[in-house]
Image: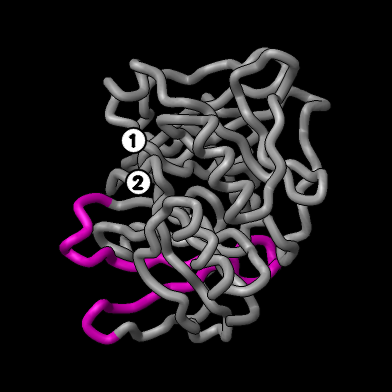
Amino acid sequence: MTTPIRFTWYELMTKDAGAAGAFYRQVVGWTTAPSAPGSPYTVFSADGVAVGGMAELTDSDRASGIKPQWIGYMPVDNVDDSVAQLVKAGGALHGAIEDVPGVLRRALVNDPQGALFALFTPVPGSARPMPQAASVGSVGWHELMAVEGPTAFDFYLSLFGWTRSGVFDMGPMGDYQLFGAGGEGDFGGIMTKPAVIPSPYWTFYFNVDGAKAGAARVRDAGGIVINGPHQVPSGDWVVQARDPQEAIFALVSKTP
């Protein structure tokens, strides 16, 4: 995995797909549709372009410790080989590698500090177009709250070819390390989580028109605003939130 790799798909694991779909339609402006006629898997789209998907947690998911959350997927040439490299680097396979017939082969994995994400190899011809990075409804930022930020960054750099860019001094909270991949500019940040946060996790920031209006929609739809709206050093405005099924997500906008 030497070629830079980045997240290209985002999946919500939720307790109630119907309610979660209604929430994100209202808050982010996505449309929802089954991935195929009669399929329980829902696809989120922005302006007709698929952004991510949604599935309800199964009893097996719950038994393995998966809670309502957003999971980022990164494409690799061969899932089995990539999982072997990840395990050698200190990560772990979460469950078993799975095939989705006609779509992909995937593996849920943990980094060495326990943050969950996914690797996948699409079936030839099944790849979907992605929305423009700055368009409303697309994913505008990726953020890891790690147990120990610098060590976590080294893991992702070694496996996925990410590059280190700027660093923001967060005072008592430590450094916020920006990263990029493939010469496309910064697309995320990693920091050491505060002690009050029990475990590491990835947060994905969805582009909206106006942070204040987005925060209001979160509250109106039954979610909780955890932090914000506030302006970050890049000049963007952000909101961290939790949906009614307790999955963490965030909103980002060029305007307050």
| Residue under the image location 40 percent in, 30 percent down | 15
| Residue under the image location 78 percent in, 37 percent down | 128
Going by the numbered disc 1, the residue's amino acid type is: Lys
Going by the numbered disc 2, the residue's amino acid type is: Ala
Residue where numbered disc 2 is placed: 115
Q: Which residues, given as a range, are shown in magenta?
A: 171-199
What is the quadrant of residue 132 in the picture? bottom right
Q: Which mark is residue 216?
A: none
Magenta span contains residue 111: no
| Residue under the image location 27 percent in, 20 percent down | 63
Instruction: Identify which residue, 11 or 6, lies in the foreground.
Output: 11
Position of 246 relative to 215 (above/below): above
Is label 2 or label 1 in front? 1
Q: Position of residue 154 (x, y in %)?
A: 39, 59
Q: CA distance from mark 2 to mark 1?
A: 12 Å
Position of 71 relative to 255 (above/below): above
Residue where numbered disc 1 is placed: 67
Q: Earlier in the sequence, mark 2 or mark 1?
A: 1
Q: Position of residue 184 (x, y in %)?
A: 70, 67
Instruction: Identify which residue, 63 or 187, lies in the foreground.
Output: 63
